Amino acid sequence: MNRKEQRQLWLAEYFKGTDFKVEAASEDASFRSYFRVTTRLPAEVKSYILMDAPPEQEDCKPFIQVQKLLAAKQVNVPKLYATDLELGFLLLGDFGDQLYLAALEDDPDRHQDLYQAAIDAMLNIQSIEAAQSQLPPYDKHLLLTEMQLFTDWFIGEHLGLQLDESELAVLAETYLQLSDNALQQPQVLVHRDFHSRNLMLVTADNPGVIDFQDAVYGPLTYDLASLLKDCYITWPAEIIEQHCRYFLQHYNQRFNANIELAQLQRWFDLMAAQRHLKAIGIFCRLNYRDGKAAYLNDIPRTMNYLLATAEKYPEFKAFHLLLQAIQPVLPIKVSRS
């Protein structure tokens, strides 16, 4: 029995005689895929999302664990209607198909209310304590492993470059500095992919938050960097600072902290650099390993963030020079179809 037949049988068992229709909803940067399931009852049409996560490649248990944690803190996450860990199916509530990204591209002036709502949700996420979450730590090993994706998949696989010992030493030192920056920060629950393609514009209680199954306990500014230095949309520095100030004011008030803006800014910039190194590596891996070429389009924006941060901080001068040397070798534009 193929995967499509398994989905149909599983849904038929759940809906027990109610007619339903299944359409592709989206895919993401994993082996998961998503389908919109609609049912037509005498009085209403109801819509669900079926997550199809093949168990040999994906584990649904972290999604269920984090969904319960976030829902308990009034974060607007999809309702969980049914689970089958053996088959790798989850039936979820449907937030629709209006991404934050599309809403912001259509009307950039909406950034203030949409990002403030997102930051409010982020603060709720950060209120979950480590003992309560029982999530793994975003430790030095994980931080360094993620940045190594840049070396392996972008420099090695995508650009086809073989760096000499001095150039590899520059990368190693940069990776250590960025990991140290992450570990020096207050540690909170981190969504780990809190950006405009994982935040949904909904009719009430924005944003609808999805794709949270990789959550860990880690650096304070990680999700803020994901949101404001987003690999899929760029904002002027003054808008980024405006939202950093909003975050800092509300974080300090809520958690009785006294972090200064300058400290937050450094944490934030260097945290974003760690994430951008990882993201560029992942975009290349998605192309060469998984056949998802459209992610290559997001490398130039992400590289520009890295260049700006490396130029801003003198201790990253050697890293900035290395980036400038490899920067002209960027991917061609490819279709997102």
Image (cartoon, helix red, strand yellow):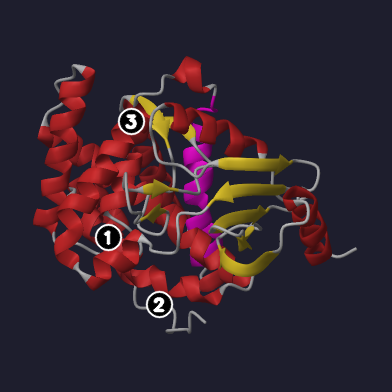
Which residue appears at 60% of the width and 36% of the height?
64
Mark 3 touches mark 2? (CB < 8 Å): no
Cα distance in 3D space between marks 1 and 3: 27 Å
Range shown magenta:
135-156
Callout 1 secondary element: helix
Callout 2 secondary element: loop
**How many numbered circles are shown?**
3
Which residue appears at 38% of the width and 64% of the height?
98
Look at the image and say whether residue 171 sits in the magenta stretch: no
Query: What residue is shown with label 2?
Result: 330
Disc 3 marks a residue whose amino acid type is Asn
Disc 2 marks a residue whose amino acid type is Leu
Say which mark, if any, is on residue 194: none
Which residue appears at 9% of the width and 55% of the height?
238
Q: Where is residue 78 in the image (x, y as percent from the top left)?
A: 50, 45
Crowding at mark 1 (Cα within 10 Å: few <14, some 14-19, many 20+): many
Please identify the quadrant where the N terminus is shown: bottom right
